[in-house]
Amino acid sequence: MKNALLHICCAVCAAGSIQRLREDGYEVTGFFYNPNIHPEEEYKKRLEAAKGAAKSMGFELIEGHYDKDGWALSVKGLEKEPEGGRRCEVCFKIRLSAAAGLARDKGFGYFATTLSISPYKNTKVINEIGDSLGHGSFLAYDFKKNDGFKRTMDFAKGHNLYRQHYCGCVFSENKNIRSS
Ligand code: SF4
């Protein structure tokens, strides 16, 4: 069995991504690392939902550090960027760097991210960042393909998973930028 650490942005996106990885023979451990999420109450809601998905799907979930101040500092000056712009690239990189580091430290052979299951995010950019950090260990999936997005939404509805209405950061909250 191949071990993969999966960066999880939210419970809804986790479901279909984990189904796909399991079908491809990976044993998956989840990593909830999202210092971008604002406000903290929303962070807690998404974390609890991810814990619920971990329980119902039977995978271990590791919670990363909620370094919201560090995240805000990293995107300083990019507040007015449009959806999919440079702020999002920095945001992807922060989360994927943490996943790459943890995968290395804990001896996972591979790491991946749920981010590509969203039709609202640029999979090419996500996977280029992952490849640049992974040195061969990044699994460059496009999880939305082959009905991946539909399957994840079906699972989320069937299990009544919490579904947020904006991507995560304060800027997306104000502009209603969707995540999934
Ligand atoms: S819109 Fe989403 S991906 Fe872009 S910076 Fe905000 S939380 Fe990150």
Image: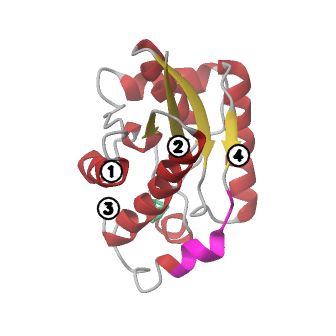
Query: Which numbered disc flags the more N-terminal residue, 3 or 4?
Result: 4
Tell me the distance, in whole angstroms, between the alpha carbons under discs 3 and 1.
Answer: 11 Å
Label 3–label 1 contact, CB within 8 A: no
Rounded to the nearest angstrom, the CA distance separating label 2 from label 3 is 26 Å
- Coordinates of residue 153 in the picture (x, y in percent): 49, 27
Q: Amino acid at mark 4?
A: Leu
Asked if residue 14 lies left or right of residue 84, the reply is right
Residue at image mark 4:
47
Mark 4 or 1, nearer chain start: 4
The magenta stretch spans residue 10 = no
Q: Which quarter of the figure has residue 54?
A: top right
Disc number placed over residue 84 in the picture, else none: 3
Q: Is residue 53 left or right of residue 101?
A: right
Question: Mark 1 = which residue?
Answer: 126
Query: Which residues are the magenta region?
Result: 65-73
Measured Cα–Cα span from mark 4 to mark 1: 22 Å
* Mark 3 beta carbon near ligand 1 (under 8 Å): yes
